[in-house]
Amino acid sequence: MKMDSNKIKRRGRACMTALGTIALAAAAALPASFVAGSAMAQDNVVISAEECARNQSIGTITYVSGYGYSASAGQLDVFLAKEFGFFDALCLDVDINAGGANGQLLVASGQAQFTALGSASDVMLAAANSRNLKAVATYGNNSPFSIFANEKIKSLKDLEGGTLGYFINITPIAKAMLEAADVDLSKVSLIKMTNYDPTVVPRGQIDAIVGYASNQPEKLRSIGMPFNEFRPEEFGLQGTYNVMEVNSQFLADHREVAADFMRASLRALEFCLTNEQDCVQQISALAAANNQGSAFPEDQQARTWAVESSWVRNAEKSPGVHTPADWENEHAMVEKYGELAELPAIDEMMDADLVASLYVDGKLQWPR
């Protein structure tokens, strides 16, 4: 049983209309064998009739992007798996909520099935309040966080008597950095930031911010503003970069379908690791077509993906594959600094087998 070819072609025409010449250029760059199942490759479904019927029977699978159209692993690849037709090729009907909603709450409640988070710490902090979430992929062993500071701050110790900004919360790994630098936090004024403008740091409105290493510091570098940056690895601290979570019950009931969702998104990630410019152009055009272009301009997206794609490659394992050992350091930091009454064990929060099963000798199996 094949998917209706007219349906796929209609989706393809809509995609091309939205993305214009950018999508056409990217399509030309994609080998036909790579995009089997998309409109660009003329409507081939790449799984059996039985598997197709199984996947279609699930109905709509909802993915929530808590960070909009950011060029990040676990997000960029999901958007482009849909645009390239990889979900269609596996008979998956995927809807993307890119409104920046709280993906953890929606997935835990069963209103959505997948969402991506910034680090294993985020997963652990959420898991303390909900056991209906399971991490199925971790995309790197670099923490995405850094502390960027006014150039007068030569060491983190210099923050004593000064101000430190943060978004949402001061991440456990940032607290570990401050402790490693022997900073007395009682002597630092902590300020919750209300916007993501990094220039407040070099302009002296605040001494430092716990920010995203691929974003705010890269913006400051691009405009030549002076600052100092402190990364976890400088203090011997190892974190994690981006995690894909799924509703635990959905995973238990529909494991093969969840595997196919990950297979399609990892197929897109594989392409974007070697075709960075094409993917940055596509995700930026999607953002613009959906009224988020000002939040995700192409130059910013290019800087972000240049850094974050290197984190995926530097993981020294197949993209998305993780083991409990990858989370152990961060688990200890969350236990110490997360202020939780109870922290679940790693194996309660992680499925280490799903994504690993999609690779043979380090090669993603497409379709099987």
Image (tube, grey):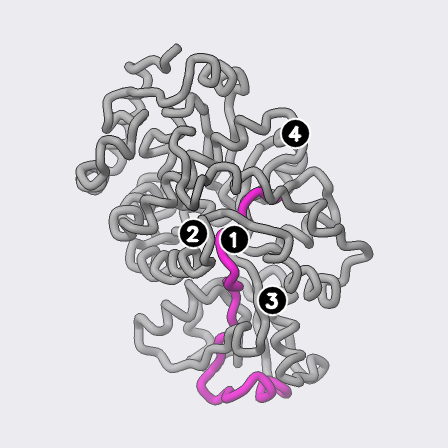
Quadrant of the rendering where the N terminus is positioned? top left
Quadrant in the picture for residue 312: bottom left
Mark before the other along the chain sequence, 4 or 3: 3
Quadrant in the picture for residue 330: bottom right
Residue 137, position as x, y percentages in the image: 54, 46
Mark before the other along the chain sequence, 3 or 1: 3
* Residue located at (47% from left, 46% from top): 74
Residue 112, position as x, y percentages in the image: 58, 33
Q: Secondary structure at mark 4?
A: helix
Spatial CA span between label 3 and label 1: 23 Å
Residue 60 lies left or right of residue 83; in this view the side is right
**Label 2 is placed on what type of residue?**
Ser
Which residue sits furthest right? 341
Please tell me whether residue 301 is drawn above or below residue 283 in the rendered image: below
Which of the two residues, 51 or 368, is positioned nearer the viewer here?
368
Spatial CA span between label 2 and label 3: 24 Å
Residue mark closest to the camera, 3 vs 1: 1
**Label 1 is placed on what type of residue?**
Asn
* Residue located at (47% from left, 13% from top): 50
Task: Look at mark 3 in the image and give the residue it sits on.
Answer: 192
Which of the two residues, 50 or 67, is positioned nearer the viewer here?
50
Q: Which mark is residue 72?
A: 2
Residue mark closest to the camera, 1 vs 4: 4
Residue 208 lies left or right of residue 123; in this view the side is left
**Label 3 is placed on what type of residue?**
Lys
Q: Secondary structure at mark 2?
A: loop
Marks 2/1 in contact by CB < 8 Å: the verdict is yes
